[in-house]
Image (spheres, rainbow, N blue to C red):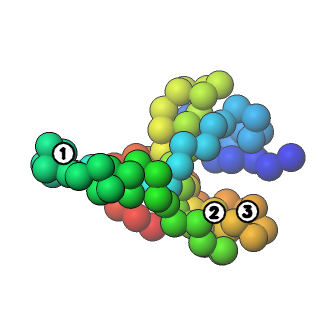
Amino acid sequence: MILIHCPYCDEQRPEIEFAYAGQAHIARPADPDSYSDEEWEHFLFIRANPRGRHHERWRHSHGCGRFFNAVRDTVTDKFETTYKAGEPRK
C-alpha cells in the first residue's frame, strides 16, 4: 500500500483516498478565444509522460477534498514530496 502525505490535513493516508488529477503546473491560455482547434487539442490532451521524476496534481477526495501537487518517481512509484496548490514547483 502506498501512503500519500496530504499537505492540508498534514497526515499520510492510503492511496485509495486520493485521485490523480494530471500533470501539475499547466498554465491556462491568457487569451482562450485566440486559440485554434490544434492549439486547444495540445493544451487539453498533450501532457508530459516522463520516466522518473514527475510533477503531478492530486486530490484528497476521501479527506479534505483539496487539490495539491506532488513530485513522484514514475519508475518506483514513490512520492518524493507533496505541497499545496499555488506553491512554486519543488
Q: Nearer the viewer, mark 1 or mark 2?
A: 1
The label number, if any, that marks residue 32 in the structure image: 1
Q: Which mark is residue 3?
A: none
Read off the residue under disc 3. 78
Q: CA distance from mark 1 to mark 2?
A: 30 Å
Under mark 2, the amino acid is Arg
Looking at the image, which is closer to me, 31 or 11?
31
Res 20 → quadrant: top right
Q: Amino acid at mark 1?
A: Pro
Can residue 63 be seen?
yes
Q: Earlier in the sequence, mark 3 or mark 2?
A: 2
Q: CA distance from mark 3 to mark 2?
A: 6 Å
Q: Amino acid at mark 3?
A: Lys
- Which residue, given by chain and number where applicable, does mark 2 sit on? 72
Q: Is residue 72 above or below residue 11?
A: below
**Residue for point 66% across, 36% down:** 18
Q: Is residue 57 left or right of residue 14?
A: left
Q: Which of 21 and 9 lies nearest the eye of the viewer?
A: 21
Q: Nearer the viewer, mark 3 or mark 1?
A: 1
Q: Earlier in the sequence, mark 1 or mark 2?
A: 1
